[in-house]
Image (spheres, grey):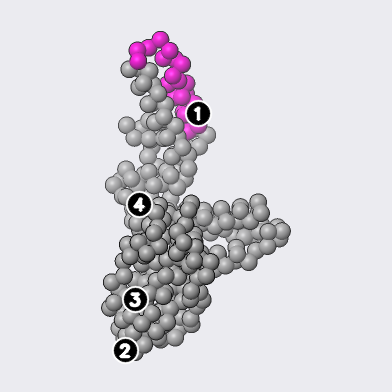
Amino acid sequence: MNHFELFAIEPEYAVDLADLQVRYRKLQQAMHPDRFANASERDKLLAVQRTSQLNDAYHTLRDPLGRAEYILGLRGVDMQHEQKTLQDPEFLMAQMEWRERVEELNAGDFTAIDQAYSDLERETKVLQEQLEQQIAEADNDEAANSIRKLKFMHKLGRELEALEDA
Amino acid sequence: MAYSEKVIDHYENPRNVGAFDKNDHSIATGMVGAPACGDVMKLQLKISDAGIIEDAKFKTYGCGSAIASSSLVTEWVKGKSVEEASQLKNTQIAEELALPPVKIHCSILAEDAIKAALEDYKKKHAS
Ligand code: FES
């Protein structure tokens, strides 16, 4: 049973998160190991395994990137994160500029940091919309590239957060 | 993470940091990024008409291993022919810097940056 089947929802990128949470809670209750207190050892073990699978599934589907990657995985696409580099010069040039911009930000300059956040959010949204369309159209290679690009955007987000905490 | 001495040396005193004018016809530029961590690297080669790499510069936004890897390869490729430079393998980098397995992708970044720069060189000189 794959993660989508587990929650009895369609394997699509657009997921109703509130609905997903409700389904998660229900399944969680049904599977709770306490309910198996008097069951056989084997059934207890099964209940524990199911619970961990359920948690796994929920965390994967709740996260937009995790969900997108999971859908591609179901379609037989392996993202090969560790091995594959991204070589899109235009995108990478923009990333370089982004990193330079973040590097030059001062920790105390909240106006500039806020501006950077909203710019980053806007660019991220464009990529997410592209990803959604590519997944819907089963344009899997392009979707994989969008996921890779979004990982760079998330990295920028973390860099900005680090700046705020500094 | 315990870094090896060589990594720390290259990280604290990176060689060849900087940039060339990418529009100069003797300059080849390679840009790569590692989705695994979101880090980016720009590596540039100055290549003579005879196809010898005369100089190299890099700018890396990444971890210590990535900075050390790019610093190391810019030293290595100087004086090499385009052909020789294209033979460079990330395993040589990883070995020289004693990188642990989780840091292999950082050395792959450096290998691919050289390759991307050599691609750019070929493109520029094809016409
Ligand atoms: S962790 Fe990103 S390049 Fe090393």
The residue carrying pointer 2 sits among few (fewer than 14), some (14 to 19) or many (20 or more) residues within 10 Å by Cα, namely few
Which marked residue is nearer to the observer: mark 4 or mark 2?
A: 2
Mark number, residue A22: 1
Q: Position of residue A80 (x, y in %)?
A: 34, 53
Amino acid under disc 3: Leu
* Residue A147 shows in the view: yes
**For the magenta stretch, what is the residue range?**
A20-41
Q: Which secondary structure, mark 4? A: loop
Task: Give the label on residue B50, or none.
Answer: 2
**In-image side of A143 versus A98 (left or right):** left
User: What's the residue type where badge 2 is placed?
Assistant: Ala
SS majority, magenta: helix
Q: Check mark 1 vs ligand 1: CB closer than 8 Å? yes or no.
A: no
Report, in whole angstroms, how far the alpha carbon at label 2 lies from the one at label 1.
Answer: 68 Å
Foreground mark, 3 or 4, reads 3
Q: Nearer the viewer, mark 2 or mark 1?
A: 2
